[in-house]
Amino acid sequence: MLLLSIVIYLIITVVIGYWASRRVKTSGDFMLAGRSLPLLLSSSALFATWFGSETVFGASSEFLKGGLYAVIEDPFGAALCLVLFGLFFARKLYSMNLLTLGDFFKVRFGKRTELVASVFIVPSYMGYIAAQLLAMGLILNVVIGMEVWEGVIISALVVTFYTYVGGMWAISITDFIQSVIIIGGLIVLAINLTIKAGGVAAVLSEAHPDTFQFLPKGNFKEVVIYVGAWSVLGLGSIPSQDVFQRVMSSGSVNTAVRSCYIAAIMYLTIAMLPLFISLCVKHLYPEFADGDAQLALPTMVLGHATLPVQILFFGSLLSAIMSTTSSAILAPSAIFSENLVKPLAKGRLNDKQLLMITRFSVLGFSVIATIMATMRSNIYELVGESSMLSLVSLFAPLVLGLYWKKSTATGALLSMVLGTFAWFIFGRLDSSWPSLIPGLLVSLLAMIFGSLVWKKK
């Protein structure tokens, strides 16, 4: 019955994607849903940006190991990103009427910077997509015993199909439905486990005293690591195409800004549920928490929950992961076609041809991420790695490009290249210091130095 429910759910998702494809007439419809989403759809789409495998699997397993201090990156950093985007970026970027984030670098710094920025944006999504596909492979492995790599391939086929045909319209409509299922499934499971455990107080009383430590203890190195954890998603995901395309798909600038705040509140609230559920699992069934922590929740639900709870839980898991994956696949595809292929074609492509190239890019990036997912096993690490590249290469050019009039193309190019180089070099050193901090500082200094020395003519 559980397997049948999963199959039916996947079929319904594909049908919705196919139905949404009827709204896609232009590349703008495919990439940004025609900039016409109401507040409800826009907020649910933003909420679903990161609420995937790293929140349910990755964050809950890290929480069991190190408490709140171990999950600063996600969900807290992710919620911070949405708040900052709403405060400082949504209104300015929306008023520029851009199709992709790469278009900002073209308008602000020129075509050469657009090409270089696009080269940095596209690779950052491969690990992120792979993490989501890996999570769906793990779910199918737990539920029906299928090999993880087989589950990865099946999941990739389903998500790629409805993204390919429906683009942002399919993503937005399925995100709303999936958000309802996510919230309902996690609330039901949390209530069910709380009752079994004898109440919230009984669960929290057994938690280790350090479980709820939220602030660093004062050591300078620990403070730097703490700031780095906030920065991975909190700052690193600001210059990302998936956040950009979800915000820019809103029907108005006010909707874009408000949806950021609503999604941040929703994300931080609902993301607490997997953390609390993991404590319940450790309290009721410690044997599951002692094994692979990423599989603790699904294994426990399969072994001890009733069938309706199983259906709701696995339905919410699949909803969370599929909504995240579809947007992550569309993001590099839009950048690749609009900001790499289109400029190199020099006006020889019409909109219909550009739409076709974007769809074929969806297939290509899905294949690459699928191969990566069969070769890696840690979901939380894959997600973190994907955001660091954006942080050390694109954050400084985006922020200073919007708020510093003296910013130049040379400064932006130096910032992208030197920031990434510094991050790579420090990452290779045998050090426990976060390499993203020196990478970000070098990127910022290179942006300022390059803009002041090589001034715009």
Image (spheres, helix red, strand yellow):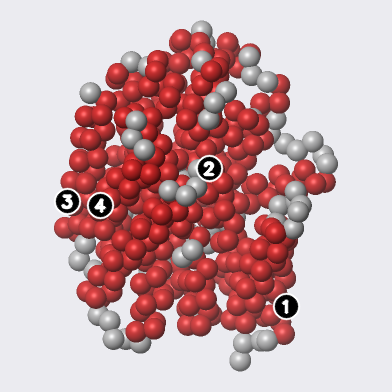
456 to the left or right of 334: right
State if disc 1 and disc 2 touch (CB < 8 Å). Answer: no
Mark 4 or mark 1, earlier in chain = 4
Label 1 sits on a secondary structure element that is helix
Which residue is located at x 66 percent, y 86 percent?
455
Question: Circle 3 — which element?
Answer: helix
Q: Quadrant of residue 428?
A: bottom right
| Residue to which mark 2 is pinned | 378
Judged left or right of residue 14, residue 93 is right
Q: Residue at x 33, y 43 (%)?
A: 150
Outermost residue, bottom side? 457
Question: What's the residue at 35%, 51% (across, down)?
Answer: 326
The residue labelled by disc 3 is 19
Q: For the residue marked with disc 1, what is the amino acid?
A: Phe
- The amino acid marked with disc number 3 is Trp
Q: Tell me the amino acid under the disc marked 2.
A: Asn
